[in-house]
């Protein structure tokens, strides 16, 4: 039985409704946690419900329509994630060590995010075949979304798959509700000072099952390195990092508090208002401090490995561009957006972005162009890391552009603007590639998915423009309100980059160079010499900056999946994607959407 057309009134209406719902809910999640779950599977669940009501007559042939809904929602939440930049502007205005008061109105945020997000869509579209056809690029959430779409569309006709998806999703929901809603279980801590432990849940277990043993063990290795070496990093560079987060006029007073056994109310208030990372130091949360050291070698190893891998596959890249340039054959529909369209749209959007940033932020047009050009290779890095680990390094790629942008300008405000633009471009690229993976598995047309993602960007931009001021007015920024740690990291990075090379913590520069060389070696060893026993640079590097409480469950999931494959290969082949998809979708639905809404309305 053939699939229905992709663009129907049901798919368009569902795309708008579901995108609006999930993107309006997303800023609260991101500002509260500093990160947000991938909403692809959640959107697939919601899309299936919508189509079950509006397209009942074609049940069993609605998979590509649901892919349209899921694609639009993924684009919208990819844009909505950039509420962290609005928070970064807020934190920068609160920073007492600098005199920068850059404000951004809702309209400015909307136009800015629309331009940068759309650039990310078209810049990423040209690399679809390179990433989606690479067997090492799993894109676990894209696979989970495709499995969810197919199984839910077939319903009971899917038989065992439908049952297993339901059971595993319920398991994920129950565990997430017990953990986050009732707070009956927490984290099994091994060294919580450095966030080494196991967070109870099955979302990351499912992720590990999909990404496989090699990447899972690479992430385990990165976690062990952080566990073993972080005390040394803290000893050598910890206080340097803490001091750089505190205004100079308050440093002598704050430094004295580090040796006070019992703080008075006045001292606690001083620490709360002006203490920066000293609060983390005294509370024993050292991971947030050492992460600002590990981010340098982690970024270096991932960037050099990814760019080397791209260079080794230059023939594939050349062939891909030839296909994009080729004229459409008579009687054949073009699969991808043409290279000409990509170049024209990216150029026009960059010009518009230069105008917007000059008018809104007094940023010279040439700096915008330089930022777009510098951000282009970072898309390749970010998408590659996402494809292997199922975690998108959006904020890390934004931090990387901040370091690169220091060459063009020491201005703190311009650095932060460039970071936000790079973050949104990267976020859209990562979301689009997950969508392409899902589309490949359900039979959608990549060209259609690209345009759907493009038209959904304004929905996410509007969500940020509307929800961010409302959330900050209700909860406040920082302190007891919305912590927005990613926004704080972006703001602090902009301040640090204004100091130039002196911003590097002790030892970080040397190990960044070493890590860059190691990244080239790993990519050459695996790609040129087939030394597949070498660690995944993406998995290892990203594990250096991700909490071990996330890395360890992923590693456990990959090991469990490997045992399942070895012991019961037939069962594994039939069911592992379904079980993993249910784990991811069930927990994400509760922890990523339902509970935040209940918290928002005061139920918990």
Image (cartoon, grey):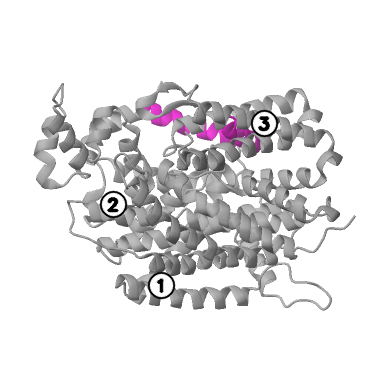
How far apart, in angstroms, are the residues tagged by discs 2 and 3?
39 Å
Tell me which label, 2 or 3, sits earlier in the chain: 2
Residue 147 coordinates in the image, percent (x, y): 73, 44
Q: In the image, which residues are magenta?
A: 202-228
- Res 171 quadrant in image: top right
The structure residue drawn at horizontal position 52% and vertical position 38%, both measured from the top left corner, is 595
The structure residue drawn at horizontal position 79% and vertical position 36%, both measured from the top left corner, is 161
Categorize mark 3 by other alpha carbons within 10 Å: few (<14), some (14-19), many (20+). Answer: some
State the residue position of label 2: 91
Q: Which mark is residue 215?
A: none
State the residue position of label 3: 170
State the residue position of label 1: 369
Decide if residue 487 is on the left or right side of residue 309. left
Residue 597 to residue 454: above or below: above
Residue 526 coordinates in the image, percent (x, y): 58, 43
The structure residue drawn at horizontal position 51% and vertical position 27%, both measured from the top left corner, is 179
How far apart, in angstroms, are the residues tagged by discs 2 and 1?
26 Å
Magenta stretch containing residue 223, yes or no?
A: yes
Residue 57 coordinates in the image, percent (x, y): 85, 55
Secondary structure under the numbered disc 1 in the rendered image:
helix
């Amino acid at each position: 039985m053939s699939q229905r057309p992709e663009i129907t009134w049901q798919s368009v209406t569902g795309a708008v409704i579901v995108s609006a719902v999930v993107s309006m809910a997303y800023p609260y999640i991101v500002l509260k946690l500093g990160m947000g779950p991938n909403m692809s599977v959640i959107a697939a669940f919601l899309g299936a419900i919508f189509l079950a009501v509006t397209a009942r007559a074609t049940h069993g042939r609605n998979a590509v329509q649901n892919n349209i809904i899921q694609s639009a929602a993924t684009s919208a939440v990819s844009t909505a994630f950039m509420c962290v930049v609005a928070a970064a502007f807020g934190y920068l205005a609160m920073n007492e060590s600098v005199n920068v008061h850059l404000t951004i109105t809702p309209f400015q945020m909307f136009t800015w995010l629309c331009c940068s997000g759309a650039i990310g869509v078209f810049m990423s579209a040209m690399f679809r075949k390179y990433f989606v056809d690479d067997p090492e690029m799993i894109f676990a959430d894209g696979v989970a979304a495709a499995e969810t779409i197919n199984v839910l569309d077939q319903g009971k006709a899917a038989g065992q798959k439908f049952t297993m998806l339901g059971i595993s999703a319920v398991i994920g929901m129950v565990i997430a509700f017990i953990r986050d809603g009732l707070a009956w279980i927490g984290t099994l801590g091994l060294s919580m000072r450095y966030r080494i432990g196991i967070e109870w849940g099955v979302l990351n277990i499912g992720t590990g099952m999909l990404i496989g043993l090699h990447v899972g063990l690479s992430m385990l290795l990165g976690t062990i390195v952080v566990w073993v070496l972080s005390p040394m990093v803290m000893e050598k560079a910890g206080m340097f990092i803490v001091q750089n987060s505190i205004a100079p006029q308050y440093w002598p007073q704050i430094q004295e508090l580090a040796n006070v056994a019992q703080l008075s109310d006045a001292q606690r208030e001083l620490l709360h208002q002006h203490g920066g990372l000293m609060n983390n130091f005294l509370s024993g949360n050292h991971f947030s401090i050492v992460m600002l050291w590990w981010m340098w070698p982690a970024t270096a190893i991932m960037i050099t490995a990814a760019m080397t891998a791209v260079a080794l596959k230059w023939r594939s890249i050349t062939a891909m561009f030839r296909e994009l340039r080729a004229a459409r054959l008579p009687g054949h529909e073009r699969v991808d957006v043409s290279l000409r369209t990509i170049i024209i749209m990216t150029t026009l959007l960059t010009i518009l972005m230069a105008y917007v940033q000059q008018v809104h932020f007094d940023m010279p047009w040439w700096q915008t162009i330089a930022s777009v050009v510098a951000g282009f290779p970072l898309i390749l890095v970010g998408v590659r890391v996402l494809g292997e680990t199922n975690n998108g390094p959006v904020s890390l790629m934004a931090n990387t552009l901040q370091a690169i942008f220091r060459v063009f300008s020491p201005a703190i405000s311009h650095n932060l603007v460039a970071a936000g633009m790079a973050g949104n471009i990267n976020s859209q690229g990562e979301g689009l590639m997950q969508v392409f993976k899902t589309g490949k598995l359900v039979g959608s047309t990549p060209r259609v998915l690209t345009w759907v993602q493009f038209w959904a960007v304004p929905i996410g931009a509007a969500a940020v423009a509307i929800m961010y001021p409302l959330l900050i007015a209700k909860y406040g920024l920082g302190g007891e309100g919305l912590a927005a740690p990613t926004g704080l990291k972006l703001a602090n990075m902009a301040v640090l980059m204004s100091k130039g090379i002196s911003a590097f913590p002790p030892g970080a520069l040397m190990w960044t160079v070493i890590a860059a060389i190691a990244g080239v070696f790993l990519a050459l060893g695996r790609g040129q010499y087939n030394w597949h026993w070498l660690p995944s640079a993406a998995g290892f590097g990203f594990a250096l900056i991700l909490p071990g409480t996330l890395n360890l469950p992923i590693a456990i999931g990959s090991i469990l999946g490997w045992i399942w494959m070895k012991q019961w290969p037939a069962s594994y082949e039939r069911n592992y994607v379904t079980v993993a998809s249910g784990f991811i979708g069930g927990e994400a639905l509760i922890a990523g959407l339902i509970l935040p809404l209940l918290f928002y309305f005061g139920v918990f």
